[in-house]
Image (cartoon, rainbow, N blue to C red):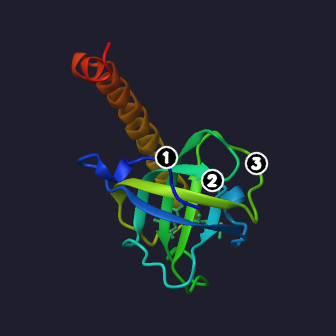
Amino acid sequence: MDFPGHLDSIPGLLGIRLAGTVVHGDKRGRKLGFPTANIASPPGTELPPDGVYSCLVSIAGRPALFGATASIGNNPTFDDVFERRVEIYIHDFDDQLYGQEIAICLLSQLREMRRFSGLEDLIGQTAADVERSRTLLRDLGLICMAVALSPAARLAAGE
Ligand SMILES: Cc1cc2nc3c(=O)[nH]c(=O)nc-3n(C[C@H](O)[C@H](O)[C@H](O)COP(=O)(O)O)c2cc1C
């Protein structure tokens, strides 16, 4: 499944696309307050550097895009994750996605992956990441709307 649109051509945005099937993780996310969809990308997929990213998500069969915050890495706060994982916390979303195909587009890196000394610190930082990601996506939406409504865009559209 391909991520729709041309977000990779907008200056200042990463526009890194990843896709795959949603698989089971360790089921810790819901207890932490941030349930994540773990994406199994096809073998050989080159993953971007570890870190926390703001992104958009497209879910097969659903017309709308969703805002999300992604975590890429081996969750170093826990000692039992040995492979690099792509996990996304989808904003304002509460549905089961196991087995479904999803595609994401990473827009901006918020920070690097870190090892926290306790769960409280991980939860606090994750909440701050999600807030920042929401603000970034909201501002991006406003910018896109302003560009679409600009006199130049209206002229180009023949209005
Ligand atoms: C926005 C966000 C930021 C995260 N940052 C970190 C991090 O810095 N260090 C870390 O060990 N795990 C981080 N994680 C991953 C969590 O540890 C992981 O989502 C949680 O353990 C649930 O994993 P599970 O789905 O396998 O149960 C982050 C997750 C999210 C959604």
Residue 115 in the figure: left or right of residue 9: right
User: Between tags 3 and 1, which lies in front?
Assistant: 3
Residue 121 visible in image: no
Label 2 CB-ligand 1 distance < 8 A: yes
Measured in 3D between alpha carbons, the distance from the residue under mark 3 to the one under mark 1, in whole angstroms, is 18 Å
Circle 2 packing at 10 Å, graded few (<14), some (14-19), many (20+), is some
Q: Amino acid at mark 3?
A: Asp
Measured in 3D between alpha carbons, the distance from the residue under mark 1 to the one under mark 2, in whole angstroms, is 9 Å
**Percent of width and height locating residue 31:** 71, 58
Quadrant of the rendered image holding ligand 1? bottom right
Label 2 belongs to which residue? Answer: 34
Label 1 CB-ligand 1 distance < 8 A: yes
Residue 91 in the figure: left or right of residue 145: right
**Percent of width and height locating residue 97:** 74, 57
Q: Which mark is residue 49?
A: none
Closest to the observer, 159 or 66: 159
Answer above or below: position of 100 versus 78.
above
**Percent of width and height locating residue 157:** 32, 22
Label 3 belongs to which residue? Answer: 95
**Percent of width and height locating residue 141:** 41, 32
Q: Amino acid at mark 1?
A: Val
Answer above or below: position of 80 versus 111.
below
Q: Secondary structure at mark 1?
A: helix
Q: Secondary structure at mark 3?
A: loop
